[in-house]
Image (cartoon, rainbow, N blue to C red):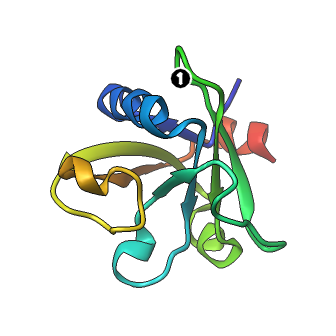
Amino acid sequence: MTQRVDLTPAAAELLRRLVSLHGPVMFHQSGGCCDGSAPMCYPAGEFRTGASDVNLGSLEVEGIEDVPVWMSGPQFEYWKHTHLTIDVVPGRGSGFSLEAPEGVRFLIRSRLLTDEESAALN
C-alpha cells in the first residue's frame, strides 16, 4: 500500500519512548515560520485540527497505536507531490513538541513521489 508519510528507525524509537511517557500521540506540521515548518508531536487530541488540515495517514509503529500525521492545507499544497519521512536529529526544536526535553528534534525529509505512487494516492 502506498503511503504519503513514513518515519526512520531512529524516529520510531523516539516515538515509542514518547508514547511510553505521554500516551498516544499525533503529529501536525503547520508550515509556519521557524519551527512551524517542522513536524510537531503532541499528545493525541491536544492539538485541534481544523477543516483545512489534511490527514496524511497514520504511522504504524510496532508496539504502539497508529499515529496520525496532519498538515495544514496551505502547506500540503506545497508538499502534495512528495513522500515525507519523519526523522530525528540532535538539537533543540520547538518547546511545544514532546521531544524538546530529549535534546533532539523531529524534521521532515522529502522526495518526489513516483508516477505510480501519485496515481495510487489520487
Please tell me whether mark 1 sits on a helix, a strand or a loop.
loop
Residue 80 placement (x, y as % from top left): 63, 60
Residue 35 placement (x, y as % from top left): 36, 73
> Which corner quadrant holds the N terminus?
top right
Front one among 121 and 84: 84
Front one among 111 and 104: 104
The residue at the far top in this view is 63
Residue 36 placement (x, y as % from top left): 44, 75
Residue 116 placement (x, y as % from top left): 67, 35
Identify which residue is drawn at 51% across, 36% down.
6
Badge 1: residue crowd in 10 Å (few <14, some 14–19, many ≥20): some
| Left or right: 44, with 39 as reference point | right
Does 33 sit above or below residue 65?
below
Identify which residue is drawn at 28% across, 44% down.
88
Disc 1 designates what residue?
61
Does 110 sit above or below residue 30?
above
Q: Quadrant of residue 115?
A: top right
How many labels were placed on the picture?
A: 1
Identify which residue is drawn at 18% across, 51% down.
103
